[in-house]
């Protein structure tokens, strides 16, 4: 093939020449100059080579080759089309990069705003923390029941009636406040389950078990589990002794008595979860190769390992700053619990969204999605942190 090509070049005396030295004006003949295309294009495949003004070239022209004038016109048009396509691709890349930059800015700005707001609410504690938490629970419950009612999930099950979903969202929002008022979760959970079962059994038509199971899980996931954060932050009122920040905390803001075990544990837990998510994201972008699970294809083992190390490091560092828990082993164990709670909470919400066929649970927060997308890592962590303090630490005399 190559031998034939080069023999043809030698036979017809083709002279390579760049496009810039050829005039496309019809008033000038090509003479003995030859055009070789400087850019590959699918539109030029039918043209082949441009020959010089020799007799051999004219003989090939009789067999069907284009004349010099048509060839030059075709080349010029093809070059312009190719340049236009290249400019369009460059414009698409520029617009995509600008869109990504805008999304990143929104994510950072709103992330900082959310972080500062949540930090202030956690420091305030009491009813300020509980009411703000209840508002977030209400929005998250609405998002959950909208996901359950979506086509992706209802294709394989019967969704609960809309009025039941709305009632359950209100009940989920009331559960943290009832926990704060009564000091325990059992009353609100039992009452909520009874009300929901009664509403489902008395509905018109044929009640289905899928309606009951998805609704009860919604009460557990969006109502019961968040109540442990109220128990952790507001229920553990024992002072965190020897806390460095608490020793210099202003008296107008509560003084050292403000720094309770519940506050310190909540701050460490929140910070550990944020560190786990952040380090996992950065580690996945830098080293991610092996997918963690099919539920969430973007998560990798490499990112998870980096997130695990970051979570434990922040947990141990803050435990040294706050002097709670007092032992290194306890600080590491607390970080491990926070990490696994955040990972499984994230995967649970990813599984719900995957069955619903959506990317985000909502669009409330620009650049972040819905409330559930931001708090999924906190769902199981509150219960694990509270159980760690009430059950694990006393076993070791801490």
Image: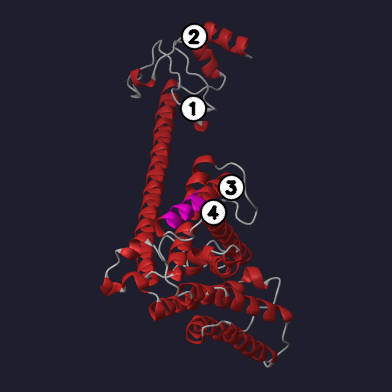
Report the mark closest to the observer, 4 or 2. 4
Magenta residue check for 305: no
The label number, if any, that marks residue 40 in the structure image: 1
**Residues tagged 4 and 1 counted as in contact (Cβ below 8 A):** no
Count every numbered label the image shows and give the total: 4
**Residues tagged 3 and 2 counted as in contact (Cβ below 8 A):** no
Mark 3 lies on a secondary structure that is loop
The label number, if any, that marks residue 55 in the structure image: 2
In this rendering, the answer to whether 291 lies above or below 315 is: above
Can you say which quadrant of the picture contains the N terminus? top right
Mark 1 lies on a secondary structure that is loop
- Could you classify mark 2 by the number of other residues whose Cα lies within 10 Å: few (under 14), some (14-19), or many (20 or more)? few
Mark 4 lies on a secondary structure that is helix
| Magenta range | 310-320
Q: Earlier in the sequence, mark 1 or mark 2?
A: 1
- Could you classify mark 1 by the number of other residues whose Cα lies within 10 Å: few (under 14), some (14-19), or many (20 or more)? few
**Residues tagged 1 and 2 counted as in contact (Cβ below 8 A):** no
Q: Residue furthest front?
A: 397
Q: Earlier in the sequence, mark 4 or mark 2?
A: 2
Mark 2 lies on a secondary structure that is helix
Q: Earlier in the sequence, mark 3 or mark 4?
A: 3
């Amino acid at each position: 093939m190559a031998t034939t090509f080069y023999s043809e070049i030698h036979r017809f005396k083709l002279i390579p020449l760049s496009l810039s030295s050829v005039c496309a004006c019809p008033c000038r003949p090509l003479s003995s100059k030859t055009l070789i295309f400087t850019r590959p294009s699918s539109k030029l495949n039918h043209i082949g080579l441009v020959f010089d003004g020799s007799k051999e070239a004219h003989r090939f022209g009789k067999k069907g080759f284009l004349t010099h004038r048509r060839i030059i016109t075709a080349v010029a048009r093809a070059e312009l089309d190719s340049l236009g396509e290249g400019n369009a691709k460059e414009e698409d890349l520029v617009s995509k990069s600008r869109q990504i930059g805008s999304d990143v800015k929104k994510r950072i700005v709103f992330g900082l705003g959310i972080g500062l707001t949540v930090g202030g609410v956690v420091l305030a504690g009491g009813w300020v923390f509980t009411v703000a938490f209840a508002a977030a629970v209400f929005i998250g419950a609405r998002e959950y029941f909208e996901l359950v009612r979506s086509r992706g999930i209802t294709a394989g099950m019967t969704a609960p009636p809309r009025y039941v979903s709305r009632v359950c969202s209100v009940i989920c929002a009331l559960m943290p406040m009832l926990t704060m008022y009564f000091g325990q979760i059992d009353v609100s959970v039992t009452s909520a389950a009874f009300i929901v079962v009664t509403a489902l059994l008395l509905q018109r038509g044929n009640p289905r078990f899928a309606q009951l199971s998805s609704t009860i899980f919604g009460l557990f996931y969006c109502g019961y589990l968040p109540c442990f954060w109220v128990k952790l932050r507001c229920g553990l009122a024992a002072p965190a002794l020897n806390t460095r920040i608490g020793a210099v905390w202003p008296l107008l803001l509560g003084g050292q008595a403000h720094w309770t075990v519940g506050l310190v544990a909540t701050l460490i837990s929140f910070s550990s979860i944020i560190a786990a998510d952040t380090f996992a994201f950065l580690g996945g972008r830098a080293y991610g190769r092996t997918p963690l699970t099919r539920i969430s294809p973007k998560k990798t083992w490499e990112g998870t390992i980096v997130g695990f190390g970051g979570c434990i490091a922040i947990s141990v560092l803050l435990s040294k700053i706050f002097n709670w828990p007092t032992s290194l082993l306890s600080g590491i164990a607390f970080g491990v619990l926070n990490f696994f709670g955040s990972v499984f909470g994230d995967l649970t919400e990813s599984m719900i969204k995957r069955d619903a066929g959506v990317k985000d649970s909502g669009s409330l927060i620009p650049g972040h999605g819905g409330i559930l997308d931001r708090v999924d890592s906190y769902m199981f962590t509150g219960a694990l942190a509270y159980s760690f303090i009430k059950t694990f630490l006393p076993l070791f005399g801490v």
